[in-house]
Image (cartoon, grey):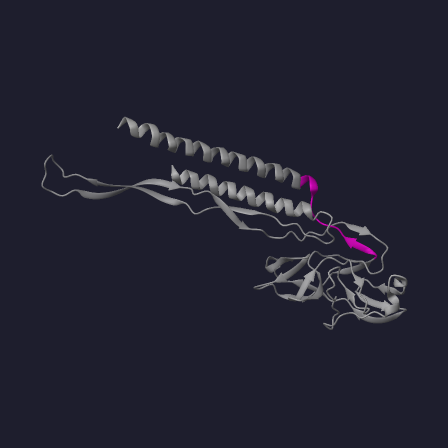
C-alpha cells in the first residue's frame, strides 16, 4: 500500500514539472527568439516482487527443517519521472520591425548569433540588437555581439538612434556603415543540439559533444525579428492536462492514505 503512495506521488511531481514547463513557455510567448522546451517522461524502474516464505517439512511433526522458497509474484511499477526537458529549435515566425539593427536568422533552425557574456561565449537567436554608448553592437542585456573574427562589432557613434539608417546588414551577415564593411556577424551551428542548453536571458550554453562550427544554409534578414516558437493554444491544453493529471494523482494518494488509516484504526481493533 505504501508503494502505491510513492507511485502516485511520483505522478503528481511529474504533473507539477509539466505545469512549470508550460508556464515558462507561456511567460516567454512574446520573447524574441525564444525556443520552447518540451517535457520527456519515462516510467521509473520497476521492482521484481517475490513471496518469501519457509515451507515446512514433508510430514507433520517432521524433524526436517523448513525449506526457504521465493515465489515470483510479478513486476511492480514505481510510477514515472522526468527524463529530460529538451529545447525545440523549430524556427518561429518573422516579424518586420523596420529597425536596421534588428536581424533575424532564416533558412535553418541550427544557427545562432555569438555573444560575449560575463560567463563566457554564449549563443542566441534573439537578434534585437542595439548600439551602446561606445558604439558597440550589443544585445538588450548589453552583451557584445561578436563578428567572425571573434571581436565585438564596433559602429561609429553617429550610427545611434538618429542615424541608424546608415547601417546595412547583408544576407551573409556583413555589417556596413555608410557603404563601408566593418564586420560580419558570426553564426554558429552545432553537430548536436541536444548539448545546447538554455542558460537564461535567452542565451544558450554548450556542453558535451555539441560540436560548434560555422553555420551553413543560414541567411540574415535585416529589419525583422524572429518571434517565439511557442504555441499558446497547445500550451493551454497542456496546462489543463497537467492540472487534471495532478488532481488524479492527488485523489489516488488520498484514497490510499484513507485505506491505510482504516487498516490501522479499525482492522487492528478486531484482532
Q: Nearer the viewer, residue 71 or 116?
A: 116
Q: Nearer the viewer, residue 219 or 150?
A: 150
The image shows residue 164 at horizontal and vertical percentages of 88, 62
Q: Is residue 208 left or right of residue 178?
A: left
243 in relation to 98, above or below? above
58 in relation to 136, above or below? above
Circle count: 0
Q: Quadrant of the C terminus?
A: top left
Q: Which residues are magenta?
A: 223-234
The image shows residue 7 at horizontal and vertical percentages of 45, 41
Query: Which of the 4 image quadrants contains residue 135?
Result: bottom right
Query: Which of the 4 image quadrants contains residue 204?
Result: bottom right
The image shows residue 96 at horizontal and vertical percentages of 83, 52
Q: State the residue at coordinates (84%, 53%).
A: 97
Q: State the residue at coordinates (62%, 65%).
A: 211
Q: Nearer the viewer, residue 122 or 110?
A: 122
Query: Which of the 4 image quadrants contains residue 126?
Result: bottom right
Q: Quadrant of the N terminus?
A: top left
Residue located farthest toward the top when viewing the structure as drawn: 270
The image shows residue 243 at horizontal and vertical percentages of 58, 37
Q: Is residue 39 magenta?
A: no
Q: Nearer the viewer, residue 257 or 194?
A: 257
Q: Is residue 63 left or right of residue 252?
A: left
Q: State the residue at coordinates (36%, 40%).
A: 74
Q: Is residue 229 magenta?
A: yes
Amino acid at each position: 500500500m505504501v508503494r502505491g503512495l510513492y507511485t502516485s506521488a511520483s505522478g503528481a511531481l511529474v504533473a507539477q514539472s509539466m505545469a512549470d514547463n508550460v508556464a515558462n513557455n507561456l511567460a516567454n510567448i512574446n520573447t524574441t527568439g525564444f525556443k520552447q522546451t518540451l517535457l520527456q517522461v519515462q516510467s521509473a524502474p520497476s521492482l521484481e516482487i517475490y513471496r518469501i516464505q519457509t515451507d515446512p517439512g514433508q510430514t507433520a511433526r517432521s524433524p526436517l527443517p523448513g525449506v526457504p522458497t521465493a515465489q515470483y509474484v510479478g513486476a511492480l511499477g514505481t510510477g514515472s519521472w522526468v527524463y529530460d526537458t529538451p529545447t525545440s529549435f523549430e524556427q518561429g515566425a518573422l516579424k518586420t520591425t523596420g529597425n536596421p539593427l534588428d536581424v533575424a536568422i532564416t533558412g535553418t533552425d541550427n544557427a545562432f548569433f555569438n555573444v560575449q557574456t560575463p560567463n563566457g561565449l554564449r549563443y542566441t537567436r534573439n537578434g534585437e540588437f542595439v548600439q551602446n554608448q561606445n558604439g558597440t553592437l550589443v544585445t538588450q542585456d548589453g552583451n557584445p555581439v561578436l563578428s567572425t573574427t571573434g571581436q565585438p562589432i564596433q559602429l561609429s557613434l553617429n550610427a545611434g538612434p538618429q542615424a541608424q539608417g546608415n547601417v546595412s546588414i547583408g544576407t551573409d551577415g556583413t555589417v556596413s556603415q555608410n557603404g563601408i564593411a566593418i564586420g560580419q556577424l558570426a553564426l554558429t551551428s552545432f553537430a548536436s543540439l541536444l548539448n545546447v542548453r538554455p542558460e537564461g536571458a535567452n542565451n544558450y550554453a554548450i556542453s558535451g559533444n555539441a560540436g560548434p562550427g560555422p553555420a551553413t544554409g543560414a541567411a540574415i534578414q535585416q529589419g525583422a525579428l524572429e518571434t517565439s516558437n511557442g504555441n499558446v493554444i497547445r500550451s493551454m491544453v497542456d496546462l489543463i492536462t497537467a492540472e487534471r493529471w495532478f488532481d488524479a494523482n492527488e485523489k489516488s494518494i488520498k484514497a490510499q492514505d484513507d485505506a491505510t488509516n482504516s487498516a490501522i484504526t479499525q482492522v487492528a481493533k478486531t484482532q
